[in-house]
Amino acid sequence: MAFSMLKNLRGFTLVELLLVLILIGIMAVIAVPNWVGSPNLEAQTQALLSDLRYTQTLAMTHGQRFDLNFTLPSSYGISDPGGTAVANPSTGASTVSLVSGTTMSSLTNLPNNLISFDERGVPYTDSAATVALTANATIVLSANGITRNIIITPETGSMVAQ
C-alpha cells in the first residue's frame, strides 16, 4: 500500500528545477547592484522626499510660504518666511547633512538652489514665492555610481522618487 502511494506522488523534474534556478539568477543579477552600496542612498532619498513633503505641509498648515534651501553638494535646510531656520523633525537640527558618500549632484529647474511652497502647496523657484515652477524640478542624489531622482511637478507640487 505504501509503495503504491509513493508511486503516485510527483516531484519537480530536473528541467523545472534548472528553470527556477536560472530565473533566480537573473533576478539576482538585476537586484544586487541596486542593493550593494546603495542602502544609504535609498534612505537619504526617502529622507529628502519626506523633508520636501514636510516643508510643503508646513506652508499649507501655517498659511504662509516655507522654503527648502539646498547647499550643494551635501546639505539642505528648511526656513520660514522670515528666513529663520526651522528644526528638522527627524534630527532636530536646522541643517541636514547628507550621509557620507551621498551627494546632490544637480538641481534641474531650481535656479536659486531652493524650492518654496505657498499656502496652497504650489511650488516656486524663489524665496519670495513669486516665480512659480513651470516644469518638473529634479533633484539628483548620487552614491557609488548609482543615482536617484526626486521629481517635483508644477502647480500641484506632487513628488516622487525614481
Image (cartoon, rainbow, N blue to C red):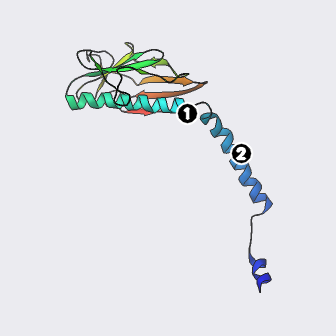
* Amino acid bearing label 1: Pro
> In the structure shown, which secondary structural element does the residue marked by tag 1 occupy?
helix
Q: Is residue 29 left or right of residue 90?
A: right
Q: Nearer the viewer, mark 1 or mark 2?
A: 1
User: Which quarter of the figure has residue 82?
Assistant: top left
Measuring 80% from the left and 82% from the top, which residue is drawn there?
A: 3
Q: Nearer the viewer, residue 86 or 131?
A: 86
x, y (%) of residue 31?
Answer: 63, 39
Give the percent coordinates (x, y) of residue 151.
43, 28
Quadrant occupied by the N terminus: bottom right
Amino acid type, residue under disc 2 in the picture: Gly
Q: Is residue 109 above or below residue 41?
A: above
Residue with the most extreme top position? 112
Report if residue 123 is visible in the image. Answer: yes
Mark 1 surroundings within 10 Å by alpha-carbon count, few (fewer than 14), some (14 through 19), many (20 or more): few
Picture coordinates of residue 77 (x, y %)? Answer: 36, 20
Mark 1 vs mark 2: which is more N-terminal? 2
- Residue 155 position by quadrant: top left
**Residue hosting label 2:** 25
Q: Which residue is mark 1?
A: 39
